Amino acid sequence: MQKIEHIGIAVQNLDLAIANYETLLNTPCYKTEMVESERVNTAFFKVGESKIELLESLDADGVIAKFIAKKGEGLHHIAFEVANIKQEMERLKQAGFSLINEVPKAGADNKLVCFVHPKTANGVLIEICQEIKF
Ligand code: ZN
C-alpha cells in the first residue's frame, strides 16, 4: 500500500463540520460530493499528502447514521491508496481478510474502493482505494 489517502470521519451535520474543520485545519474544504452508492454527503480537505473526508448520512437509517447512533461522531475509516485494487483485494482475501465488497465500487473523489471488515482489522474499518485514471 502506498500511503494513507484519507481518514474518514462520521459527522452529524456536514455544514457545521466543514466550518469546524476549516478552522481546525486552517485550510478550506476543496470539494463536496454526494456519493449515491453509499448514500452520503462528503467533504474533503487536503492535509499535506493525505486528506480528511467528512461523511454525513443522507438517510436516517444509512450506514453513517447507524454508526453515529451506535458510537457517536468520530473516526469512521482509514483509507490506503493502492496501485492495483483488484490485485490488492486478491492478496487480502488470500491472507484471510474479510472484504465487504466483492468487486471494487465507485467511491467519492474519483476512486475505486473496497472495504475490509473491521472484525479482521483489529476493529478499524479499512478502505483501499485506487484512483480512476481517464
Ligand atoms: Zn473513504
Image: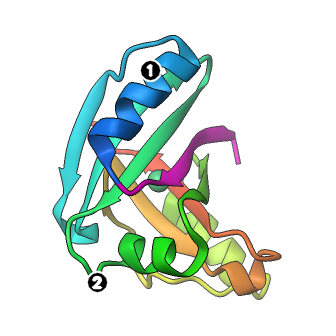
Residue 64 found in image quarter: bottom left
Does residue 33 appear to the left or right of 18 in the view shown?
A: left
For mark 2, what is the residue? 61
Mark closer to the chain start, 1 or 2 = 1
Residue 126 in sight here? yes
Does residue 42 appear to the left or right of 97 in the view shown?
A: left
Residue shown at 49%/75% (left/top)? 67
For mark 1, what is the residue? 22
Mark 1 touches mark 2? (CB < 8 Å): no
- Residue flagged by tag 1: what amino acid is it? Glu
Residue 130 at x, y percent in the picture: 46, 49
Read off the magenta span.
1-12
Residue shown at 79%/82% (left/top)? 95
Q: Secondary structure at mark 2?
A: loop
How far is mark 1 from mark 2, CA to CA? 28 Å
Where does the C terminus fall, quadrant-wise? top left
Residue shown at 42%/81% (left/top)? 66
Q: Is residue 2 magenta-colored?
A: yes
Q: Is residue 77 magenta-colored?
A: no
8 or 68, nearer to the observer: 68
122 or 9, nearer to the observer: 9
Does residue 1 appear to the left or right of 67 in the view shown?
A: right
